[in-house]
Amino acid sequence: MMRSIARVFRGFARKFCGSDQGNVAMIFGLALLPSIAAIGSAVDLSRAMVVKMRLGEALDAAGLAVGGTVGLSGPEMTARAQKFFYANYPDEELGTVTALTVQTSGQNLVMVSGTARVETAFMGLFGYDHIDVSVNVEVTRESKGLEIALVLDNTGSMASNGKIEALRAAANELIGILFGDQDTPTHLKMSLVPFSQTVKVDTTSFLNNGWMDITGQASTAKLNFANNRYAFQVWTTMSNKSWGGCVEARPNGYEETDDAPSAGTPDTRWVPYFEPDGPDSSAYSGYTTYVSDGTTGNQDTRLRRYQKYSGQNKTNPNSDCNMQAIVPLTNNKATLQSKVNAMISTGYTHIAIGAGWGWRTLSPTAPYTEGSDYGDPDWTKAMVFLTDGLNTVESNSTWHKSTYTAYNFLIRGILGTTNAGTAETEQDTRTRLVCTRIKEAGIRVYSILLEEDSNRAKNLMRDCATDPSLYFESPSSAELTPVFQAIAQDLSNLRLSQ
């Protein structure tokens, strides 16, 4: 019986093995396994490619955001990159971000890298439960040229409340941000214009280049001297004393322009600053006197007597001319820092004087020719303009009605009036005029008002800025550095062409 069953089973097995029915289905089934694996892998890889594309787009946004803002610390760069990255790659997107890094190389190269993990749907069958996708983005900063004039109030009021010290620190902070680790960058130039009731220029270059009125031809050259004498002529009679470098305001509207000085138009040349000796008679008070008049007569007769300076070894004609001289546009970081650190407080406030000279340092025309041409697409011009107060005229009860400044004595009518209040209003008008012309020349103006609550001052400085967003108020010296940092950041961004 058992042998019979075995024979039946062996026969069945021979038939089964010899049968060819169903072979195609079996072969197809076996062949289908790699096809399913390939299709499933393709799906997983396609999902990974989508993640890679989206990761790249988000990193591009992060890289441009970081690359478009210089002067950031490492943590600040990372925070800015994360902000823009996750705005473009929210958490609900396919793929989980596992790494995001930001690096810089030198001043101009920013590298942003990211990695995202994609969970697989099919490749897990073969031991691959995820795919890591990485993308690296490099952003090269292409810097445009930038010319900046720092026009900074160095008046006597800056000596209070630590203002001049805060100004030095804030200006150095701005220089540090813009120059970075470069001592002489190719595409950055900066000038420094300390101003008060006058400004100080380089005596050698202004005399040698014919920019000064050395022969007394300007309409204001002889106002303070009798017998058609003028300042340079009087200095030649003094003992080892000469012009210190400060200048009077140009008359007839030229102080509010960047017109080049010309021999053919004497009022375009500068008259030297020469503070006259006042009458020394006890009958007259309120004057600054430093030599004997050597004559009798009224107040103006005594003041205008030129012979009294002969043989005198006096520095008084250069009083209030001890501020730092203007530094023309330069790319030398150390020079700028040195001159900023040496700024002092002296004199009264003539804001239009400072604005006009700041403009001249940026202008391509004489007396300063370091500036690029207006409209040059490769260069941007900007002015950072700070004062801590109002335009002032220090009036008094003398016949001359005021102390001597770049606008001479009030009695001379250089400001179109002999009234102190009206003269201050006229200075405001001239400040607005020169600021308007500066902006019309394509110069970006940032204005800062330090520790001054007057609406008159606020409106004046706000109007001077290119737009209200570029006007800053600093209620205290301690808040001045953040203001300069914000301006430096904006100036840095102007340099970038992306």
Image (cartoon, rainbow, N blue to C red):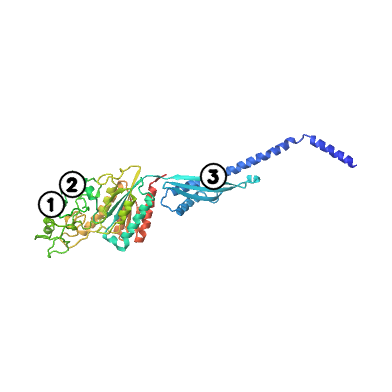
**Pointer 3 and pointer 2: residues touching (CB < 8 Å)?**
no
- Residue 153 percent coordinates (x, y): 29, 56
Which residue is denoted by mark 2 in the rendering? 266
Asked if residue 287 lies left or right of residue 136, the reply is: left
Which residue is denoted by mark 3 in the rendering? 52
Examine the rendering and report whether any part of residue 182 can be seen. yes
Furthest toward the bottom, the residue is: 282
Task: Estimate the spatial distance between the alpha carbons at disc 1 and disc 2, rounded to whole Å.
Answer: 16 Å
Furthest toward the front, the residue is: 240
Question: Quarter holding the N terminus?
Answer: top right
User: Residue 225 is drawn in which quadrant?
Assistant: bottom left
- Residue 167 percent coordinates (x, y): 32, 58
Please state which amino acid type lies under the numbered disc 1: Arg
The tag earlier along the polypeptide, 3 or 2, is: 3
Please state which amino acid type lies under the numbered disc 2: Pro
Which structural element holds mark 2?
helix
Residues 186 and 46: in front is 186
Tell me if residue 28 comes above or below residue 120 in the rendering.
above
Please state which amino acid type lies under the numbered disc 3: Lys
**Pointer 1 and pointer 2: residues touching (CB < 8 Å)?**
no
Which structural element holds mark 3?
helix
Residues 332 and 145: in front is 332
- Residue 31 percent coordinates (x, y): 69, 37
Which residue is denoted by mark 1 in the rendering? 229
Question: Quarter holding the C terminus?
Answer: top left
Tell me if residue 405 comes above or below residue 37 in the rendering.
below
Asked if residue 458 lies left or right of residue 224, the reply is: right
Furthest toward the left, the residue is: 296
Marks 1, 2: nearer the viewer? 1
Task: Estimate the spatial distance between the alpha carbons at disc 3 and disc 2, rounded to whole Å.
Answer: 70 Å
Which structural element holds mark 1?
loop
